[in-house]
Amino acid sequence: MIFELNNENFLMFAIKHYDNPNCRGIVEFNEDLKKFKYIKRLLSRYKAGKGLKVRLILNHIIVLNNLFGPDACVKMLFFKFEQKYWAQLKTFLVFLNLIPPNMQITLSINETDIPIDMVIANELRKI
């Protein structure tokens, strides 16, 4: 059975999976959660034709992965982002080898249903 994230359980899910031994309180936890917004803003700029900051997006995803672990990080990213960003998000996650094959994203969508963004994939190949 797949665990379905929603607005009511997201914060508790994040707290449960948060692993930062140096965290000095709720302020730092909230700062770490803001990385989801930063990634979304960067992908929004990319989709609007205002450039792609590949390394910055990678850095934010890597930090989130380190803080929440790969499974929770991927679930939280797909929950926080609208479906229009999923192809771009999946491309970064595949590059970082964070998304397991045939992962169930929602009850009705598998990872294989989401395409790879070839523009981003070509940029990632240059790294």
Image (cartoon, grey):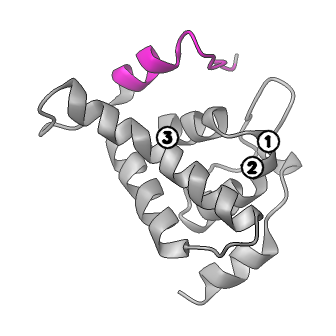
Q: Position of residue 12 (x, y in %)?
A: 42, 15
Question: What residue lies at 63% left-to-right and 16% top-to-bottom?
Answer: 6
- Label 3 belongs to which residue? 73
Instruction: Give the residue type that dot 1 points to.
Output: Gln
What segment is highlighted magenta in the picture? 2-16
Q: Position of residue 30 (x, y in %)?
A: 32, 32
Task: Check contact, mark 1 vs mark 2: CB within 8 A.
Answer: yes
- Count neighbours of disc 3 (C-alpha within 10 A) and say few if under 14, some if 14 to 19, many if 20 or more: many
Question: What residue lies at 55% left-to-right and 73% top-to-bottom?
Answer: 53
Which is in the foreground here, disc 3 or disc 2? 2
Label 3 sits on a secondary structure element that is: helix
Question: Which residue is more in the foreground, 63 or 71?
Answer: 63
Q: Relative to 5, is 96 above or below?
A: below
Q: In which quarter of the view is residue 79 placed?
A: top right
Q: Relative to 82, is 13 above or below?
A: above
In this picture, residue 46 sits left or right of residue 57: right
Label 3 and label 2: CA atoms lie apart by: 14 Å
Residue 114 belongs to the span the image colors magenta:
no
Q: Position of residue 93 (x, y in %)?
A: 60, 58
- Name the disc covering residue 86, or none: 2
Question: Which residue is more in the foreground, 40 or 6?
Answer: 40
Any part of residue 99 in sight: yes
Instruction: Give the residue type that dot 2 points to.
Output: Trp
Label 3 and label 1: CA atoms lie apart by: 17 Å
Label 2 sits on a secondary structure element that is: helix
Task: Check contact, mark 3 vs mark 1: CB within 8 A.
Answer: no
